[in-house]
Amino acid sequence: FEDLQRAYQKALTVIMKEENGLTPRFYLRCLVEMEDFINEFWDERKSMSKNNGKAMASLRQKLRKYNKDFEEEIAKFRENPDQEDEEDDEKQDDSGDSEEEDTASMFRKSEPSQAAPDTSKFKKTVDDASDSESDWGSDSDSETSSSDDEGKYQNIRERFIKKAIDRDDEPEKDEGKKQRKERERKEKRDKRREEDDGEGEWETVKGGVVVPSEKPKMFAKDADITVPAVLKKLNEIIAARGKKRTDRREQIELLHELQSITETHNLGPAVIVKIKFSIVSSIFDYNPKVSDAMKPEYWSKLLERITEMLDMLLASDNIEISESITEDAEQFETAPFKIHGCVLTLVERLDEEFTKLLKECDPHSNEYVERLKDEKQVAGIIDKVQEYKERQAAQDPTPGTNSELCRVYLRKIEHLYYKFDPNVLKQKDGEVPKDVVTSVQ
């Protein structure tokens, strides 16, 4: 019933145009037959299952509500339900009679044209031939049609194919194909431009020279560069992260430029740490697919930025970075500096990216060996985070700080390797002097 309603709604515009708004009789017949069917089996719903009884009641209610819009037309249909069939039969009879009359009239017209030949001019054999022709029909029609075909077609191939090829239409068809292919190429090109694959947007090339897109200016020439102004610009850049049309590479470049401006104007270590933290987060977000490994050039940048940020945190006792610090409580101008963020989360994600890089490489290749060399830097970064968290735990021994410290220890254990040293046991038994350095010492 719902499918029938939807089909009627789709065809409503055609009905209004072709039928002048009158509902087709076959549709009224469907509604009437459905209503009669429900009324016929309505008393038997008690013997049905619970679900079928509910469905029948719901269908009856919907049908009654829907038929209110067609009450007058349904009433007229019920008065004479077979009217359409009778009209169709009458039309068919009339058409049949008219066809017979047309055939008879055509036959009468053709009789005079077939005049009887003068038998006195022909011999008996000719009369016999005419009799046989009258029995089997004349071939004059076929001969005239074949002669017409010979004049119509230029060669045998055109005679036997369904339709002769119009040579004048071929250039138009070729032109239409070219336009269609050009349109498809243009759509594909526009689609590639819209898709952001992390490599930046497409640039228009004219005469072999790349037209560089204008980068947004960081600050005006006469602008007063202060800590609030830099933080405002930083928030503007961060707000564009994750959007569809954002160029991730350009965003990293803007953050590096903002960092150089901050260092030039000596706006304090806290602002620089905040910007470096944002650069690290942007490098993590550079890869659009989380399951894929990071590109090697961005991996090296990531190690450098995290190392620089941790060195600044360890060099100053006045900078505190923690998740418990809200963005409103951040302090960048006066010591002690407070920054919202979590260094431990960055290190954990760094370790996961290192595992992805190793999985992507062939274990028998030189590339795998080169990537393994980076584990020394990863372990060094984990040691620096451990030192920073131990210092925080000594200043503020809260349960949250201790749990973060345990997470750092677990990361460090995963990068430790054990190698048996027999000199340790020999030294313990006195076979090796105590001044000999072993792996335990």
Image (spheres, grey):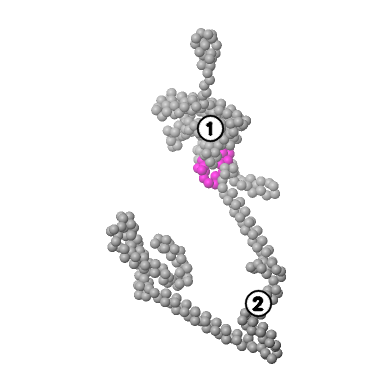
Main SS of the magenta part reads: helix
Residue 380 percent coordinates (x, y): 54, 26
Q: Which residues are magenta?
A: 237-257
Q: Tell which residue pokes out farthest to the bottom in this image.
A: 120
Residue type indicated by callout 1: Thr
Look at discs 1 and 2 and give the one toward the viewer.
2
- The picture places residue 325, in percent across and down from the top left corner, at 43, 33
Residue 187 in the image, given as x and y percentages of width and height: 59, 54
The residue lying toward the viewer, choosing from 398 and 162, is 162
**Residue 62 in view (yes/no):** yes
Q: Residue at x 47, y 34 (%)?
A: 341
Name which residue lies at 59% across and 44% down.
200
Contact check, label 1 and label 2, Cβ < 8 Å: no
Q: Which image quadrant for residue 49?
A: bottom left
Query: How many other residues sit within 10 Å of disc 1, few (<14), some (14-19) or many (≥20)?
Result: some
- Of the residues under marks 1 and 2, which one precedes in the sequence? 2
Horizontally, is 181 left or right of 62 in the view? right
Estimate how packed mark 2 is, as few (under 14), some (14 to 19) or many (20 or more) residues with alpha carbons within 10 Å. Answer: few
Residue linked to disc 1: 355
Residue 254 can be seen in this image: no
Q: Secondary structure at mark 1?
A: helix
* Image height of 249 relative to 52, above or below: above
Q: Which residue is mark 2?
A: 142
Name the residue located 37 percent from the left edge and 67 percent from the top edge.
Answer: 33
Q: CA distance from mark 1 to mark 2?
A: 86 Å
Q: Nearer the viewer, residue 293 or 265?
A: 293
At 48% from the left edge and 28% from the top edge, which residue is drawn?
A: 411
Q: Which label is found at residue 363?
A: none
Count of numbered tags: 2
184 left or right, relative to 415 = right
- Please say whether residue 275 is one of the residues in the magenta stretch: no
Q: Quadrant of residue 246?
A: top right
